[in-house]
Image (spheres, rainbow, N blue to C red):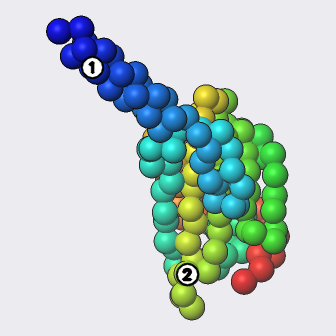
Amino acid sequence: MTSIHMKLNWILSLALVVAAFGLSGCVETVDGRHRAGVPLFRDQVDGRYDRTPAELWAAAKDVLKHHGTLVGEDTLKNVLEASVDERRIWVKVEEFDTKTSRIIVQARGKSGGADMEMAAFIDKQIAVRLASGNLTPATPVKR
C-alpha cells in the first residue's frame, strides 16, 4: 500500500511542478519584447477601422494620455505603451489593407495577468475618440 502512496505522491508532485511552470513565464508584447507574466490567458483585442494609421495613432495616443500615463512611443514598430490604473497597455497600429487600418490593444495587470476588460475598454475608447473627430495633430506612422 505504501508503494501506491509513493507513486501517487510522485505524480502529484510532478503535476504541481508542471502547473507552476505553466502558470509562470514570459509573455510576448505587441512590440516584440517579452515580460514576466501568465501566458495561458488571452490579453489582446483587435480592432479594424476605415481610417488611416495616422488617425488611429492620434486617437490611441489621446486615449492613453487621458486615462493614464504614456510611457513609450515606438514609431518604428508603431506601438504606444502606457500605464493605466496600475496596468500596462500596449497599442499597435498598422495598415490592414488599402482602406482599413488595425489596432491591437494588449493589457496586462501589475502581476503579469491578462486583463481583457481593460484591453476592450481602451479599444472602445479609441473608437469613441475616432467617432467624435476630436483628434490632436497626428504623428506620422510609417507604413
From what the image shows, is residue 68 above or below residue 4? below
* Quarter residue 137 falls in: bottom right
Left-right relation of 132 to 46 = right
Which amino acid is tagged 2?
Phe
Query: Label 1 amino acid?
Result: Leu
Residue 97 position within the rendered picture, expressed as x and y whole percent measured from the top left: 54, 87
- What is the x, y in percent for residue 121? 50, 46
Residue 60 % position (x, y)? 66, 58
User: How much space separates mark 1 and mark 2, taking CA atoms?
Assistant: 52 Å
Query: Residue 107 or 6: which is nearer the viewer?
Result: 6
The reply to whether the C-beta atoms of the residues labelled 1 and 2 are less than 8 Å apart is no
Report the quarter where the N terminus lies.
top left
Q: Position of residue 139 (x, y in %)?
A: 82, 70
Classify residue 8 as left or right of residue 28.
left
Q: Quadrant of the C terminus?
A: bottom right
Q: Name the residue under label 1.
A: 8
Residue 85 seen in the figure: no
Left or right, residue 125 beside residue 70: left
Residue at the image position 64 percent from the left and 54 percent from the top:
29
Against 134, residue 27 (above or below) is above
Q: How crowded is mark 2: few (under 14 residues within 10 Å), some or many (20 or more)?
A: some
Which numbered tag is attached to residue 132? Answer: none
Q: Residue at 61%, 29% (x, y): give it.
A: 111
Q: Name the residue under label 2.
A: 96
Q: Is residue 55 visible?
A: yes
Point out the frontmost of discs 1 and 2: 1
The residue at 24%/8% (across/down) is: 2
Q: Is residue 41 left or right of residue 5?
A: right
**Number of other residues with Cα within 10 Å of mark 1, as a class: few under 14, some 14 to 19, many 20 or more:** few
Q: Pick whichever, 20 or 99, lies toward us.
A: 20
